[in-house]
Amino acid sequence: MPLELIPILALIAMFVAATLLPINMGTLGFVAAFLVGTLAVGMNTDDIIAGFPSDLFLTLVGVTYLFAIAQNNGTVDLMVQGALRLVRGRVVFIPWVMFGITGVLTALGALGPAAVAIIAPIALTFARQYRINALLMGMMVIHGAQAGGFSPISIYGVTVNNIAAKAELVNSPLTLFLGSLFFNAGIGVLLFIFLGGRKLIGRTVHDTFDEEGPSGSGRSAPAGATDGTGGTGGAGAHGGAPVFSGHGTAASTATLTAPPNSPLSPLPRRSVSFDQVLTLIGLGALAVFALILDLDIGFVSMTVAAVLALASPKAQKGAVSQISWSTVLLIGGVLTFVGVLQEAGSVEWVGNGVAAIGMPLLVALLLCYLGAIVSAFASSVAILGATIPLAVPLLLAGEIGPVGVIVALAISSTIVDVSPFSTNGALVLANAQGVDRDTFYRQILKYSAIVVAIGPAIAWAVLVLPGWL
């Protein structure tokens, strides 16, 4: 067996094990890096550890720590309240507000699943109360998270740009961000058109059906009335699934209901605190220092988080435990193993095999589908960390534009997070209200199958094909 094939087989085994078993793929990555590196490749432990992405580690810890503080002190809730009041009672804008606020959170550095966990319960509460298609609302939240997910200071954006920089590829962080933003916004428009968004035009929160019937009428909704998703409002077989509150904690029932004096917000009105003002200033400073002054995102986010913690010790209580350690472990382990993969020459070996095909456009398309299919069941970050290095030899050959391929791979590997087997899709399913969950599950499954089937092809046609022509 060729030496170069051993790490690839180990990578496949890691994906299969992490998909079928409840184990973090990062753990398997560290183990595989140690075993394959020492036994097969002949590396020492210092060489293996040198592949650990210390810069990404600092970024992940700093950014998720900062957002844990922002969530604890109510700044995230404040942002949601402000966005919701902009609709001024017009139901047609509510799905787009949810899309936008989730995108802002991820663009500022929040992890996609964290942003979805915060916004999905609020969005799906509105879907039930104002008779908005639950599938439309849930998918708008997920695609909103992906729309902002590749900003230069976001976790996905930093990961992809870091990989491209280490491979010395021509890359454009702005193109990556805008490509994902416009692609997901386009999907949002299609969802809005085909899932009943046009029926919301002209409606207000005062003349739509809520749980008790038309606002102020005192009548109940007709028995068996649907919400536009095919559900009947029953609990369904999955009625006991946990529902995540606006603070990302599990609860047995939905805790977000609209107070009588504020039909647009599931959150009580309250004055803006000093901690929240300071947090908003800190988030703005993060964007300025990281994007304009080009300072390290990890150090800046950690500095802002430390200032907030010192200014208000109570607000940061428990924030360290809310750092996404599972994601830190995942990225650290996978990218450490990728270093072993590169040291073994597996990347060049695959690249030579790709070159032998003589059809770089076809290879780019296959890589897009590979990322989409695997990511529908596994971590998108892990897929990005594996597929982009595999595409490096193809991109260095110069036959197709590297920027377009990188953006297409990034989009293909993340738009499939709508799958009910992914964290984002599962969060939407768990927080659905007033629908038959079995029916809603099948709807999400059908939609995710459509995305997997045509999403990579569209990304390839829009971003890769023009560079070839």
Image: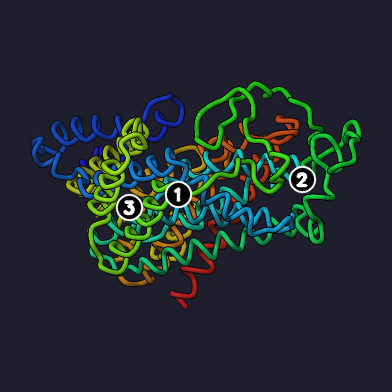
> Residue drawn at (55%, 49%), measured in percent from left and top?
80
Residue type marked 3: Thr
Question: Of discs 3 and 1, which sits in the foreground?
Answer: 3
Q: Earlier in the sequence, mark 3 or mark 1?
A: 3
Q: CA distance from mark 3 to mark 1?
A: 15 Å
Q: Which residue is mark 3?
A: 159
For label 3, the crowd category at 10 Å Cα-Cα, with few meaning under 14, some 14 to 19 and many 20 or more, is many
Q: Quadrant of residue 92?
A: bottom right
Which of 314/347 is in front? 314
Q: Which mark is residue 371?
A: 1
Q: Separation of disc 2 and disc 1 at Cα?
A: 37 Å
Q: Secondary structure at mark 3?
A: helix
For marks 3 and 2, give the CA distance. Answer: 39 Å
- State left or right for residue 5 relative to residue 137: left
Q: Position of residue 353 (x, y in %)?
A: 32, 55
Residue that mark 2 sits on: 130
Q: Residue at x 43, y 24 (%)?
A: 21
Kindly identify the amino acid type of the residue bearing the numbered disc 1.
Gly
Q: Which comes sooner in the sequence, label 2 or label 1?
A: 2
Give neighbour class at mark 1: few <14, some 14-19, many 20+ (Cα, 10 Å).
many
Q: Amino acid at mark 2?
A: Tyr
